[in-house]
Amino acid sequence: EPPLSLPAVTPQPTAAAPAAAAPSTTAGRSARLLPPAGAGTNPFATSTAQPAAAPAAPPPAAVEPAAAPAAAAPAVATTAGGAFAVQLASQKSDAEARAAYASLQRRFPSILGGLSPVIQTADVGTRGTFYRVRLPFGSAGDANRLCNDLKAAGGDCFVGRN
């Protein structure tokens, strides 16, 4: 990408143009530290007089991430798998894991109501086998969104790679 360059700030003529010289004589202040009279705008702001081609390159990259979460707003867990998963519980038996998820669904119906978990076994060495209650997602954003919603409602979870 080419480096960004700031547009030159050119004072626009106003009805109070003669007053622009007044700040340089005010109480020992330097004229270069004060904005011109009537210029209540940020001199670093993008001017509307710039050609449309210059700022066109950066906004598409900035717009795409904002558009993607809006399109994926309803977080839907995939039962076939995904790169990321929200882990909700870890129990010592398959039955306990399923009961834990049923309890979470009753406690947080608006968040977990229609989602089906994947129960994964994990051998944890001397501690034995655990049954992890997980909801797989295709993206980290979707997984984080669901986990954040659950935490905001008083639940607990974490996001990890599947």
Image (cartoon, rainbow, N blue to C red):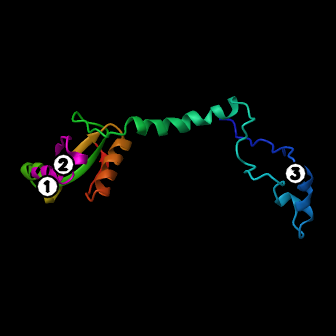
Q: Position of residue 129 (x, y in %)?
A: 13, 52
Distance from disc 2 to disc 3, alpha carbons, whole Å, reads: 70 Å
In the image, residue 154 above or below residue 12: below
Marks 1 and 3 close (CB-CB < 8 Å): no
Name the residue: 18% across, 40% down: 116
Q: Which residue is mark 1?
A: 91
Decide whether residue 105 is among the magenta residues. Answer: yes
Q: Is residue 62 left or right of residue 99?
A: right
Q: Which residues are magenta?
A: 99-121
Q: Amino acid at mark 2?
A: Val
| Residue 72 tag number | none
Q: Amino acid at mark 1?
A: Gln
In the image, residue 108 above or below residue 83: below
Distance from disc 1 to disc 3, alpha carbons, whole Å, reads: 75 Å
Name, please, the residue furthest toward the top: 53
Name the residue: 59% across, 36% down: 59
| Residue 16 tag number | 3
| Crowd rating for badge 2 (residues with CA inside 10 Å; few <14, some 14–19, many 20+) | many
Q: Position of residue 162 (x, y in %)?
A: 28, 42
Along the line of sight, which residue is nearer the eye, 73 or 142? 73
Q: Quadrant of residue 125?
A: bottom left
| Residue 133 tag number | 2
Q: Secondary structure at mark 2?
A: strand
